[in-house]
């Protein structure tokens, strides 16, 4: 695979025009095609799945260091995988948590706070897969 500079040099040679104006135009084409390819492939190349296990009555779970952004969450109870919605705002999250002690095996909301993924209602049983 060619580096960016290698691509630029090859463009100049292939067009038989190594002027700065032509190379700048080539830069634009290279950048546009690179963005197009990355956008088509990034879903498969840059995403991964991480698994955690619920602990009874524990709301927050440390996000592993190699996870930069949580895009979605599910919890599996038995053989059923339940999607969990992301809380749209901190105010929404705070309103949910005004009532304490509410637990369930099927969390409805998650929120990222201080390096943790937190669930509401708090998982009630240990051993389910997040």
Image (tube, rainbow, N blue to C red):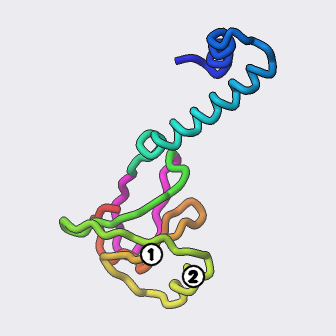
Residue at 51% x, 85% y: name it: 96
Residue at 68% x, 9% y: name it: 16
Task: Give me the C-alpha separation between circle 2 and circle 1.
Answer: 10 Å
Check residue 72 in the rendering and tell me which mark sits there, or answer none: none
Mark 2 touches mark 1? (CB < 8 Å)? yes
* Front position in the image: 1 or 126: 1
Q: Secondary structure at mark 2?
A: helix
Q: Quadrant of residue 29?
A: top right
Q: Report which residue position mark 1 lands on.
A: 109
Circle 1: is it few (<14), some (14-19), or many (20+) Cα within 10 Å? many
Residue 3 in the image: above or below residue 100? above
Q: Is residue 12 magenta?
A: no
Dominant SS in magenta: loop
Farthest-out residue, bottom: 99
Residue 119 appears at what percent x and percent y?
44, 73
Q: Which residues are magenta?
A: 50-65
Q: Earlier in the sequence, mark 2 or mark 1?
A: 2
| Position of residue 77 in the picture relative to residue 60 (left or right) | left
């Amino acid at each position: 695979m060619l580096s960016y500079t290698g691509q630029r040099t090859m463009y100049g040679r292939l067009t038989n025009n190594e002027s700065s104006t032509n190379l700048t135009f080539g830069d634009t084409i290279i950048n546009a095609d690179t963005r197009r390819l990355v956008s088509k492939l990034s879903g498969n190349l840059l995403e991964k799945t991480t698994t955690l296990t619920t602990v009874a009555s524990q709301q927050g779970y440390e996000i592993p260091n190699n996870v930069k952004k949580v895009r979605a969450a599910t919890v599996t109870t038995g053989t059923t995988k339940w999607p969990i919605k992301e809380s749209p705002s901190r105010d929404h999250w705070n309103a949910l948590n005004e009532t304490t002690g509410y637990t369930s095996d099927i969390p409805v909301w998650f929120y990222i706070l201080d390096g943790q993924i937190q669930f509401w209602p708090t998982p009630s049983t240990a051993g389910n897969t997040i």
